[in-house]
Amino acid sequence: MDMEGELEALMTRYQAGDFAAARALIERLSPRLHSFFGAQTGKRADADDMLQDAWLRIHRVRRTYRAGRPLLPWVYAIARRVRVDHYRIAVRTATREQQFEEMNAAAPDTTCEVQRVEELAELLAPLPASQREVLELLKVAGMSLEEVAQATSSSVGSVKQKVHRAYERLRRTVGLMESNRRHSEVEP
Protein backbone atom coordinates (compact mmCIF):
# COMPACT_ATOMS: atom_id res chain seq x y z
CA MET A 1 0.00 0.00 0.00
CA ASP A 2 1.40 3.42 -0.94
CA MET A 3 1.83 6.26 1.57
CA GLU A 4 -1.32 8.14 0.46
CA GLY A 5 -3.42 4.98 0.52
CA GLU A 6 -2.15 4.16 4.00
CA LEU A 7 -3.02 7.66 5.24
CA GLU A 8 -6.51 7.41 3.73
CA ALA A 9 -7.04 4.03 5.42
CA LEU A 10 -5.92 5.48 8.76
CA MET A 11 -8.33 8.40 8.34
CA THR A 12 -11.21 6.08 7.51
CA ARG A 13 -10.47 4.03 10.64
CA TYR A 14 -10.19 7.28 12.66
CA GLN A 15 -13.63 8.33 11.41
CA ALA A 16 -14.98 4.99 12.60
CA GLY A 17 -13.67 5.67 16.12
CA ASP A 18 -10.30 3.90 16.02
CA PHE A 19 -8.16 6.27 18.07
CA ALA A 20 -5.06 4.13 17.55
CA ALA A 21 -5.42 5.01 13.86
CA ALA A 22 -5.77 8.67 14.88
CA ARG A 23 -2.55 8.46 16.87
CA ALA A 24 -0.75 6.88 13.90
CA LEU A 25 -2.13 9.57 11.57
CA ILE A 26 -0.95 12.31 13.93
CA GLU A 27 2.52 10.75 14.16
CA ARG A 28 2.85 10.55 10.37
CA LEU A 29 1.43 13.96 9.43
CA SER A 30 2.55 16.18 12.31
CA PRO A 31 6.17 16.63 11.12
CA ARG A 32 4.92 17.74 7.67
CA LEU A 33 2.33 20.10 9.12
CA HIS A 34 4.80 21.50 11.65
CA SER A 35 7.21 22.31 8.79
CA PHE A 36 4.34 23.88 6.84
CA PHE A 37 3.47 26.16 9.78
CA GLY A 38 7.10 26.86 10.72
CA ALA A 39 7.89 28.05 7.20
CA GLN A 40 5.51 30.96 7.63
CA THR A 41 6.33 32.13 11.13
CA GLY A 42 9.87 30.97 11.74
CA LYS A 43 8.91 30.63 15.41
CA ARG A 44 8.66 27.17 16.88
CA ALA A 45 6.08 28.20 19.49
CA ASP A 46 3.76 29.62 16.82
CA ALA A 47 4.17 26.51 14.68
CA ASP A 48 3.37 24.36 17.74
CA ASP A 49 0.22 26.39 18.42
CA MET A 50 -0.93 26.16 14.82
CA LEU A 51 -0.24 22.42 14.72
CA GLN A 52 -2.36 21.90 17.82
CA ASP A 53 -5.13 24.07 16.38
CA ALA A 54 -5.00 22.13 13.11
CA TRP A 55 -5.42 18.79 14.87
CA LEU A 56 -8.30 20.13 16.94
CA ARG A 57 -10.02 21.30 13.78
CA ILE A 58 -9.32 18.03 11.97
CA HIS A 59 -10.81 16.17 14.91
CA ARG A 60 -13.93 18.37 14.90
CA VAL A 61 -14.53 18.03 11.15
CA ARG A 62 -13.23 14.49 10.62
CA ARG A 63 -16.69 13.36 9.50
CA THR A 64 -16.47 15.66 6.45
CA TYR A 65 -13.60 13.68 4.93
CA ARG A 66 -14.91 11.42 2.16
CA ALA A 67 -13.34 7.98 2.07
CA GLY A 68 -11.55 7.21 -1.19
CA ARG A 69 -10.66 10.87 -1.76
CA PRO A 70 -7.05 12.07 -1.38
CA LEU A 71 -6.42 12.90 2.27
CA LEU A 72 -3.51 15.32 2.02
CA PRO A 73 -5.38 18.04 0.08
CA TRP A 74 -8.18 17.86 2.68
CA VAL A 75 -5.68 18.12 5.57
CA TYR A 76 -3.73 20.96 3.96
CA ALA A 77 -6.91 22.90 3.22
CA ILE A 78 -7.57 22.88 6.97
CA ALA A 79 -3.92 23.75 7.68
CA ARG A 80 -4.06 26.72 5.31
CA ARG A 81 -7.18 27.96 7.09
CA VAL A 82 -5.40 27.64 10.45
CA ARG A 83 -2.41 29.54 9.10
CA VAL A 84 -4.59 32.36 7.73
CA ASP A 85 -6.56 32.60 10.98
CA HIS A 86 -3.34 32.68 13.00
CA TYR A 87 -1.99 35.46 10.78
CA ARG A 88 -5.19 37.50 11.17
CA ILE A 89 -5.13 37.11 14.94
CA ALA A 90 -1.47 38.13 15.07
CA VAL A 91 -2.13 41.23 12.96
CA ARG A 92 -5.15 42.22 15.07
CA THR A 93 -3.21 41.72 18.29
CA ALA A 94 -0.23 43.72 17.03
CA THR A 95 -2.52 46.53 15.85
CA ARG A 96 -4.34 46.68 19.18
CA GLU A 97 -1.09 46.67 21.12
CA GLN A 98 0.31 49.43 18.91
CA GLN A 99 -2.84 51.52 19.31
CA PHE A 100 -2.75 51.02 23.07
CA GLU A 101 0.91 52.05 23.22
CA GLU A 102 0.21 55.12 21.09
CA MET A 103 -2.73 56.08 23.29
CA ASN A 104 -0.63 55.81 26.41
CA ALA A 105 2.27 57.72 24.85
CA ALA A 106 0.11 60.53 23.53
CA ALA A 107 -2.21 60.79 26.56
CA PRO A 108 -3.89 63.96 25.32
CA ASP A 109 -5.40 66.50 27.62
CA THR A 110 -9.10 65.69 27.49
CA THR A 111 -10.36 68.55 29.63
CA CYS A 112 -11.08 70.62 26.52
CA GLU A 113 -13.02 67.76 24.93
CA VAL A 114 -14.99 67.18 28.12
CA GLN A 115 -15.83 70.87 28.23
CA ARG A 116 -17.05 70.75 24.61
CA VAL A 117 -19.19 67.69 25.30
CA GLU A 118 -20.72 69.43 28.31
CA GLU A 119 -21.37 72.57 26.22
CA LEU A 120 -22.97 70.48 23.48
CA ALA A 121 -25.15 68.65 25.99
CA GLU A 122 -26.22 72.02 27.47
CA LEU A 123 -26.98 73.41 24.00
CA LEU A 124 -29.02 70.33 22.98
CA ALA A 125 -30.85 69.99 26.33
CA PRO A 126 -33.85 72.18 25.38
CA LEU A 127 -34.52 70.11 22.24
CA PRO A 128 -37.16 67.37 22.29
CA ALA A 129 -35.61 63.92 22.74
CA SER A 130 -36.33 62.81 19.16
CA GLN A 131 -34.63 65.90 17.67
CA ARG A 132 -31.68 65.61 20.05
CA GLU A 133 -31.30 61.94 19.14
CA VAL A 134 -31.15 62.49 15.37
CA LEU A 135 -28.68 65.38 15.74
CA GLU A 136 -26.42 63.29 17.96
CA LEU A 137 -26.55 60.36 15.54
CA LEU A 138 -25.88 62.57 12.52
CA LYS A 139 -23.30 64.97 13.88
CA VAL A 140 -21.66 63.24 16.83
CA ALA A 141 -21.80 59.61 15.66
CA GLY A 142 -21.31 60.59 12.01
CA MET A 143 -24.09 58.42 10.65
CA SER A 144 -25.79 59.04 7.29
CA LEU A 145 -29.45 60.03 6.99
CA GLU A 146 -30.31 56.50 5.89
CA GLU A 147 -28.48 54.96 8.85
CA VAL A 148 -30.19 57.33 11.29
CA ALA A 149 -33.57 56.52 9.75
CA GLN A 150 -32.89 52.83 10.14
CA ALA A 151 -31.59 53.21 13.69
CA THR A 152 -34.61 55.25 14.79
CA SER A 153 -37.16 53.21 12.80
CA SER A 154 -38.13 56.35 10.89
CA SER A 155 -38.21 57.41 7.28
CA VAL A 156 -35.45 59.54 5.80
CA GLY A 157 -38.00 62.34 5.35
CA SER A 158 -38.92 62.21 9.01
CA VAL A 159 -35.26 62.40 10.01
CA LYS A 160 -34.73 65.41 7.72
CA GLN A 161 -37.74 67.11 9.24
CA LYS A 162 -36.51 66.53 12.80
CA VAL A 163 -33.06 67.83 11.90
CA HIS A 164 -34.50 70.94 10.26
CA ARG A 165 -36.68 71.69 13.29
CA ALA A 166 -33.76 71.09 15.63
CA TYR A 167 -31.56 73.50 13.65
CA GLU A 168 -34.28 76.15 13.71
CA ARG A 169 -34.66 75.80 17.46
CA LEU A 170 -30.88 75.91 17.98
CA ARG A 171 -30.60 79.07 15.84
CA ARG A 172 -33.20 80.79 18.01
CA THR A 173 -31.47 79.59 21.20
CA VAL A 174 -28.03 80.72 20.02
CA GLY A 175 -29.52 84.03 18.84
CA LEU A 176 -31.02 84.63 22.27
CA MET A 177 -27.73 83.73 23.94
CA GLU A 178 -25.85 86.19 21.70
CA SER A 179 -28.42 88.89 22.37
CA ASN A 180 -28.19 88.37 26.14
CA ARG A 181 -24.38 88.42 25.97
CA ARG A 182 -24.39 91.71 24.08
CA HIS A 183 -26.81 93.26 26.57
CA SER A 184 -24.67 92.21 29.52
CA GLU A 185 -21.58 93.78 27.90
CA VAL A 186 -23.35 97.13 27.36
CA GLU A 187 -24.79 97.44 30.86
CA PRO A 188 -22.31 98.63 33.52
Image (cartoon, rainbow, N blue to C red):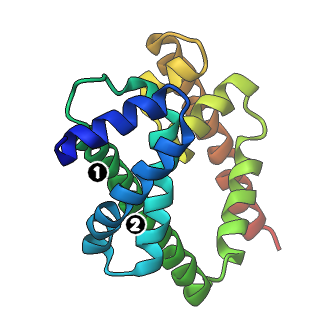
Q: Which residue is mark 2?
A: 91
Residue that appears at 49% across and 10% down: 155
Q: Residue furthest bottom?
A: 105
In the image, residue 97 sits, relative to residue 24, either above or below, namely below
| Label 2 or label 1, whichever comes before in sequence order | 1
Residue 57 shown left or right of residue 135 in the figure: left
Residue that appears at 43% across and 54% down: 26
| Residue 163 appearing in the image | yes
User: Which of the 4 image quadrants contains residue 42?
Assistant: bottom left
How far from the left and from the top, in percent, is residue 6?
27, 41
SS class of the residue under badge 1? Answer: helix
Q: Amino acid at mark 2?
A: Val
Q: Residues within 10 Å of mark 1 (few under 14, many from 20)?
A: some
Residue that appears at 75% across and 58% down: 118
Q: Residue furthest front?
A: 1
Closest to the observer, 155 or 186: 155
In the image, residue 15 sits, relative to residue 170, either above or below, namely above
Residue that appears at 55% across and 86% down: 106
Q: Which residue is mark 1?
A: 80
Q: Nearer the viewer, mark 2 or mark 1?
A: 1
How far from the left and from the top, in percent, is residue 144?
42, 32
Q: Residues within 10 Å of mark 2 (few under 14, many from 20)?
A: few
| Residue 142 appearing in the image | no
Please identify the quadrant where the C terminus is shown: bottom right
Q: Amino acid at mark 1?
A: Arg
Closest to the observer, 100 or 87: 87
How far from the left and from the top, in percent, is residue 64?
39, 24
SS class of the residue under badge 2? Answer: helix
